[in-house]
Amino acid sequence: MNDLRASIVISSYNYARFLPVAIDSALAQTYQGLEVIVVDDGSRDDSAEVIRGYGSRIIPLIKSNGGQASAFNEGVKLSRGDVIIFLDSDDYLAPDTVARAVELFRDPAVAKVHWNLEVVDESGTPTNTLVRDRLSEGDLREVVLRKGPDGYSWPPTSGNAWARRYLETALPIPELEFNTCPDLYLATLAPLYGTVRAISQPQGFWRCHPVNASFRDSFADNLRDGLRRAEQAVSTLERHAQALGLQVDPKELRFNSRWHQMKLALDRIEHAVHPGIPIILLDQDHWKAGKRLGAFPRFHFTEKDGEFWGLPADDRAAIDELERLRGKGAGFFVIPWPYGWTLDHYRGLDGYLRLKYRVAYEDASIAIFDLRG
């Protein structure tokens, strides 16, 4: 039965070369009760011509540039679906995505359904990697109240479907604060208003290409913008929790925010390490800091040809890599939150570091070892 209506809202800005693949994947869905809305957010390329080429098969909206949250808000106004998917125009979906998501929304308690995304390169060739290692599901309200949106694992925009009844409570998305990453706003609040369900198989494709926002900016710019968005997300969570009569601890929320912790870790590094001294940063390349972290040249752990090469196989390999990088000039070994688990896992490495090198700084947020002794 297709008694629940569904809407795919494709938001696009200057992605004319990718847009047809996204639209075609939406039109190819097996679910019958579906509408496809394409919102162009003031593109300066050929996006409008691409959109007009689909005629009545889609619902078009060509608007002035207002940011991604603006595109989401306007798309929902046009939509009639009980289930709404926001699809980035450089991504695309598997044919049965909507059908599988709608089935889970037959439970009226569900606010959000999500699925993993397979990473493809610029041309759409699979890379055999997933965007997330795993996805959370269930009643996640208490987790979010304690840890915020970083407390559970969820995919980026194109890996989510939302119940309209939830969106009507949460929208409009604040357009200035979430001109980018409006999925953060929605993912922050969804567990307050219903359960989260996960589809076990990947149902979409996330395109990795140089124009992605996450690749354009420097680490400093990404940290500044990420911290701003994280603060907005936490503040929004506090307001909604208060309105629902729920208790939150603002200090704990910020401690569990990865962007707040990155800023705190950088402050600790700048206090403990002289500028210009190379560091080994154990972040599994999640910080995307490149070859420099602010004033500090950095090595990955482990490293090959200047790139992250995965975690070491065992304690012996970890110690050998540490000493190899020390021989290349690394002066400090830095383990920021939440990667402290690696010292519990590599107990031999932990003992080696504490026996041979001085602890320059250590607290719940970071451990810094001075390798120069």
Image (cartoon, rainbow, N blue to C red):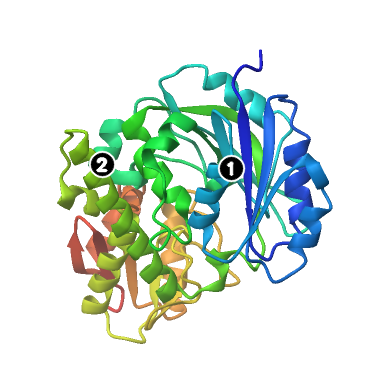
Query: Residue at the spot x=46%, y=57% of the render?
Result: 284
Say which of 285 and 21 sits in front. 21
253 in relation to 57, above or below: below
Q: Where residue 337 appears, x then y in whole percent?
A: 30, 56
- Residue 108 placement (x, y as % from top left): 44, 18
Mark 2 to mark 1 CA distance (whole Å): 26 Å
Q: Secondary structure at mark 1?
A: helix
Establish if 352 lies above or below 54: below
Q: Which residue is mark 2?
A: 240
| Residue under the image location 23 percent in, 49 percent down | 253
Instruction: Left or right? Give the position of 344 relative to 318.
Output: left
What residue sits right under mark 1 in the picture? 78
Q: Is residue 367 above or below residue 60?
A: below
Marking on residue 151: none
The x and y percentages for residue 81 are: 58, 31
Mark 2 crowdedness (10 Å alpha carbons): few <14, some 14-19, many ≥20: some
